[in-house]
Image (cartoon, rainbow, N blue to C red):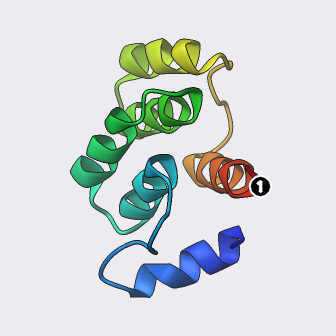
Amino acid sequence: MDPAALRTSLQAAAPPALLPLPLQALWWDAKGDWDKAHECAQADPGAAGAAVHAYLHRKEPDPANARYWYNRAGRPPATGSLEQEWDSLAAELLAG
């Protein structure tokens, strides 16, 4: 799957089967369900979950909480647009 296919899958009622939690979080975010996205990101204890968690709190906006999660993810805070960050995270996570 690539980012374009992930976006195409948004026409469905649920994310594609076997999609890892951080990608499920991005999927739900793109569907407009921040709470479900946050739940998925929070359920992943790894760096990928933390990176998506940071993005979600940046979008909220809760900059202090976002900084905490960027730190947990081991990456600097994003400075581009939210759309750019979503695309970048999706591409990174799909390349796995």
Residue found at x 58% / y 73%: 6
**Residue 69 spot, x, y in % from top left:** 47, 20
* Nearer to us in this view, 18 or 42: 18
Residue under pointer 1: 95
The answer to whether 80 is drawn above or below residue 15 in the figure is above
- Residue located at (46% from left, 75% from top): 16
The location of residue 58, given as percent across then percent down, is 45, 32
Q: What quarter of the picture does the N terminus occupy?
A: bottom right
Q: Residue at x 41, y 52 (%)?
A: 25
**Which of the pair 73/76 is nearer the observer?**
73
Total label count? 1
Answer with left or right where residue 39 lies relative to residue 95: left
Please tell me in which quadrant of the rendered image residue 64 appears: top left
Residue 35 in percent (x, y) is at 22, 48
Extreme front residue here?
18
The residue located at (68%, 39%) in the rendering is 80
Label 1 residue SS: helix
Residue 28 shown left or right of residue 47 in the figure: left
Give the left or right position of residue 9, taking residue 57 as reference.
right
Farthest residue, direction right: 95
Q: What is the quadrant of residue 27 in the picture? A: bottom left
Give amino acid for label 1.
Ala
10 Å neighbourhood of mark 1: few (<14), some, or many (≥20)?
Answer: few
